Image (cartoon, grey):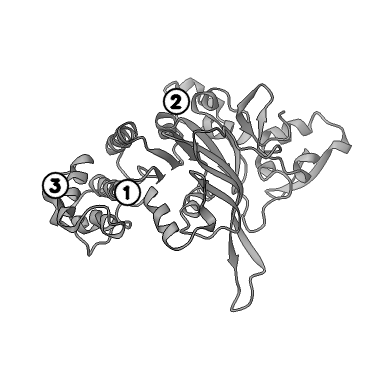
Amino acid sequence: MNNGTMPNESNDTILTVAGLKTYFPVRRGFGAAKRFVRAVDGVDLAVRRGRTLGLVGESGSGKTTVGRTILRLIPAAAGTVSFAGQDVLSLAGKSLRDLRRRIQIIFQDPVGSLNPRMTVGDIVGEPLKVHRIVPRRQRRQRVGQLLERVGLSAAYIRRYPHEFSGGQRQRIGIARALASEPDFIICDEPVSALDVSIQAQILNLLSDLQDELGLSYLFIAHNLAVVEHFADEVAVMYLGRIVEQAPRDQLYAQPTHPYTESLLSAVPRPEPSRSSDRIRLTGEMPSPISPPTGCPFHPRCPLTRAKATEMDASQRRTILSDSQPVQVVARCTTETPTLRPLPNDPGHCHACGLRQ
């Protein structure tokens, strides 16, 4: 945002992310990297205590990288991450370990995220051991309580992950995240690998845990229908940047960024007659190695092309898109829009240079 503040920033904010960048080097041989994958390229976020921020976007937009950078599983190239007043990116040693007790993650893959050589008791009990939360003699009892809290039997403590279904494995992952008694959990597409019949059960469990324990969530997903059901606020991500953020009901009812409009138009509706309202984007998402100049969405933006037809030649520019010349608004190709609040609604922010 231009004024240096965060979207929806207030005294009850538990996590603040400002200007976060995460780049991955592209090397050929053993030489120094000359190019970088800009997976996260200047992200601003704010999550309120006891609430859920949904982070949505196409695959490859950088959502998971944001979550893992916040956790320090991936190093940040630039920016700041503040959790409950602590500078996350500057912590080390015991301070970083203490922080990781308060911030946990639920992974997308309930199979790959569990060690197949460890029993459920060892998997869920490991955070209790690492952070010395309960004495050793009480660890087994505490693990049993955690399993029962997520809807599993305490008798499963000696079983291995391969003996469970996908939904049960995800419940084990949730129990492991709860073991350290966190304040904030990053949910990295926790239901995308599950059957539809199981997804609602896991979402209801996460909602119940939030109400009971006062948890805050960063809920990463590409299914907008799930996010509409679960999140309080929604941030839309495209090519490493946040292009719109607003309260859930407002964003779904009145999206202002063309990319958000296209995503919402693709959500299946019960009225087949409205299928013609879908906005079909041309081309694929550009490479994060060499992103477009100006607005990252302009090569695919229907609003940019529509506006170009209304302007004179000095305000238009011809680019090649899918090997065909396309007239676009010149400012969209040269000016990178920043995330800013709408004039009549500071809680609703977007990054579109054509809509004020």
**Label 2 Cα crowd, 10 Å radius (few <14 / some 14-19 / many 20+):** few
Image coordinates of residue 51 in percent, x first then y, are 43, 33
**Which of the marked residues, 3 or 1, is nearer the chain's N terminus?**
3
From this view, report whether residue 292 is shown above or below residue 354. below
**Which residue in the structure is indicated by mark 1?**
177
Task: Specify the quadrant that holds the N terminus.
Answer: top right
Instruction: Name the foreground residue: 41 vs 308.
Output: 41
Image coordinates of residue 227 in percent, x first then y, are 43, 34
From this view, report whether residue 271 is shown above or below residue 91. above
Instruction: Kindly identify the amino acid type of the residue bearing the numbered disc 2.
Output: Arg
Residue at (83% x, 31% y) in the render: 311
Is disc 3 placed on a helix, strand or loop? Answer: helix
Q: In whole angstroms, how far apart are the C-alphas of marks 1 and 2?
A: 35 Å
**Which residue in the structure is indicated by mark 2?**
269
State the mark number for residue 154: 3
Instruction: Kindly identify the amino acid type of the residue bearing the numbered disc 1.
Output: Ala
Instruction: Name the foreground residue: 49 vs 57.
Output: 49
**Which of the marked residues, 1 or 2, is nearer the chain's N terminus?**
1
**Label 1 Cα crowd, 10 Å radius (few <14 / some 14-19 / many 20+):** many
**Label 3 Cα crowd, 10 Å radius (few <14 / some 14-19 / many 20+):** some
Q: In whole angstroms, how far apart are the C-alphas of marks 2 and 3?
A: 41 Å
Instruction: Kindly identify the amino acid type of the residue bearing the numbered disc 3.
Output: Ala
Residue 9 visible in the displayed image:
yes
Judged left or right of residue 287, residue 135 is: left
As drawn, the residue found furthest toward the left would be 155
Q: Which of marks 2 and 3 is in front?
A: 3
**Which of the marked residues, 2 or 3, is nearer the chain's N terminus?**
3
Is disc 1 placed on a helix, strand or loop? Answer: helix
Judged left or right of residue 48, residue 153 is: left
Image coordinates of residue 222 in percent, x first then y, are 46, 41
